[in-house]
Amino acid sequence: MTRSRLPLALLTVALMALTACGGASDSSSDSGSSGSKGSKALSLVAYSTPQVVYDQIIPEFQKTGSGEGIGFKSSFGGSGEQSRAVEAGLPADIVAFSLAPDVDRLVEAGLVNEDWAQNAHDGFVSTSVVTFAVRKGNPKNIRTWDDLLKPGVSVVTPNPFTSGGAKWNLLAAYGAKSDGGKDPDAGLAFLRELLTKHVKVQDKSAREALQTFTSGSGDVLLAYENEAVTAKKKGEELDYVTPAGTIKIENPIAVTQKAAPQAKAFLDFVLSPQGQEKFADWGYRPVNQEVFDANRSKFPEPAELFTIRDLGGWKKVNEEMFDPEKGSIAKIEEDAGVSTAS
């Protein structure tokens, strides 16, 4: 049901080898996603889906006075795995994850300052909503959460124990079917039927799940709105439908404690109108209000939009639902034959 995973130490070695990630003190000329050269290199470790955004932001930053001569080494993957890899020693100057607890893990490890979220955007770089990516023309007429449980409907979503996007997906379903957490039994009953009867594949990351879907598996992909927009922009034959009830996704970004001064300049650029426009171009909802207002027509507001705080916050959700030993969703995943190892 889920792909086998390397032990964390091997994962870290593998990521370092694949991406040649180095600290800001390195003088590597390989800038990773941007492909330019610099006397210093910043290491960006991020979750998988916004790679297309950073591939555009990095060269723009390098054209500025603050970014001149700065190279980049980047690594993209499942948010949870990326966070754990940094905790285990993968060098990082900037971390950009799918959800806040993956940054908080690095706070607890002494790698990111406790006040990382105390800024004008609460530590977030972009927002989104959970939506349904469907086959072109929506042949199975998928409109609501209940439609996912129709006989013969196959759903693709990543593993929530490696992918932050998967957590958002399942919480969107749970919140919508539990009346914002007021009826937890109803929400969990829906997830049990969904995960045990309709989800056949749970990849490690949102990007891998998208690849699985676009290769022909499944009728519906649970995804960020921006994933569906990006896929269509790249020419994939799909449509997407946002259900009336869904969750607001909030994606954090932070610099690490030992990051070079240029890392803060890069963060400022990412949050600037120029950087935020790149996020809007790829279907992410900007946290910069000026840019969001200019692109408001691209981002319709779902009728019943709720947040992680409406469900009790990440601490409560992770303890009660995603704890590998006692979490309610962990138990459902185990019954579905999916690994809950993190």
Image (tube, grey):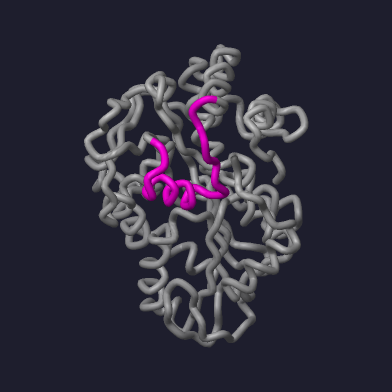
Region rendered in magenta: 197-218
Q: How many numbered marks does the figure carry?
A: 0
- Asked whether, in this view, residue 18 is left or right of residue 244, the answer is right
Q: Is residue 195 visible?
A: yes
Is residue 75 shown in magenta? no
Location of the N terminus by quadrant is top right
- Asked whether, in this view, residue 187 is left or right of residue 132, the answer is right
- In this view, the residue in front, 141 or 227, is 141
At x 55%, y 74%, the residue is 42
- In this view, the residue in front, 165 or 260, is 165
- Location of residue 139 (image quadrant): top left
**Residue 87: where, in percent of width, then height?**
72, 58
**Residue 97: where, in percent of width, then height?**
55, 52
- Asked whether, in this view, residue 172 is left or right of residue 228, the answer is right
Q: Can residue 317 be seen in this view?
A: no
**Residue 323: where, in percent of width, then height?**
72, 33
**Residue 272: where, in percent of width, then height?**
38, 60
At x 43%, y 56%, the residue is 50
- In this view, the residue in front, 292 or 50, is 50
Q: Is residue 296 above or below residue 67?
A: above
Q: Is residue 27 above or below residue 227?
A: below
At x 53%, y 69%, the residue is 74
At x 59%, y 62%, the residue is 255
Is residue 200 shown in magenta? yes
